[in-house]
Amino acid sequence: MDASLDTLVIAAYVFADSFAIPRSGPAGKVTDAELIALAVAQAVIGVPSDRQFLGVVGKLLPGFFPDLPDQSQYNRRLRRLTPWITTTQLGVAELIVSGQVRLVDGTLLGCANYAGCAQQSLFAGHAGYGYCPSKSQWYWGMRLVLMSDRNGVPVGYDLTPAGEREYEPTYRLAQAHPGTTLFADKGLWGAQYAQSLELIDVQLVTPNRHRLGERPPSEVEKARIRLVIESVFSNLKRQMRLEHHLAKTLPGLAQRIAQRLLALTLGMLLNTLLGRKPRSLVAYDGR
């Protein structure tokens, strides 16, 4: 076994095929497990366009998929399979999740690039305006709140309008992880909020206030731990191009997030088995 796109796609098919996926009507030429394997390949290659991906996958994986769906069928069936993509991802994550430390952070995902998008987009009613300090840029879209373990294995995510804070999504995610220590940034400051997490047996750790240039060693260690989830976002938004997701609806965005999280988790599992750095996915992009 080696670290390659072929290995990742085979692993995706094997894990997806191990779950019973209900389907109405006759079986198609492309099975649901094959579609999930295709979704993983698309995510790790970093091709946001379904049409473009279906045009190049035959050259990257010759003989793997003799029958390919058209773009409309591929998009429609993957949206239906989102719950099973998530189930597969969480099943893989259980094999490598370790310890009682959890990390949480959020990142903005734009949902339109034209004037008047708030009225015309199908995200209207779900998305909102939010500001990204690191880019000094306003977004109209959604905020992805992600939770991972100490090594960056995704264990849950939630979506909220870009302008809303991360308190409620984090609380919902933390409910599934009692007995853990949760590291977060200053966006979750607040004694009352920390007490509410203690009621569900979760200890919140956030940065302490300190003078500029006088960060104590304990704060440096906290920042080092939180850096792991920043690395996860880098995998998702740069190599897998989640920032350019091309989704037109909220279910479409959820599907694109789920397929990238599955690709990331499978890559981390294979890297663990091969003794590689967990989040090093360059070897799987097919280039």
Image (tube, rainbow, N blue to C red):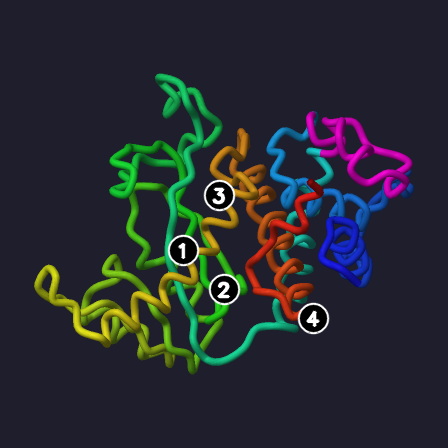
Under mark 2, the amino acid is Gly
Above or below, 240 relative to 221 = above
What secondary structure is found at the residue carrying circle 2? loop
Residue with the mark numbered 2:
152
What secondary structure is found at the residue carrying circle 1? helix
Looking at this view, is 203 or 223 the one in front? 223
Above or below, 86 relative to 68 = below
How far from the left and from the top, in percent, is residue 241?
A: 53, 39
Identify the residue at image location x=79%, y=27%. Answer: 70
Residue with the mark numbered 1:
230
Q: Mark 4 to mark 3: distance in Å? A: 25 Å
Residue at the far top in the pictured view = 115
In magenta, the rendered stretch is: 52-74
What secondary structure is found at the residue carrying circle 3? helix
Under mark 1, the amino acid is Glu
Residue 237, label in figure: 3
How far from the left and from the top, in percent, is residue 157?
A: 48, 56
* Lower sequence index among marks 1 and 4: 1
Residue with the mark numbered 4:
273
Q: Quadrant of the N terminus?
A: bottom right
Above or below, 4 relative to 268 = above
Magenta span includes 56? yes
Under mark 3, the amino acid is Lys
| Apparent side of residue 211 relative to residue 275 in the rendered image (left or right) | left
* Lower sequence index among marks 1 and 2: 2
| Apparent side of residue 36 relative to residue 178 in the rendered image (left or right) | right
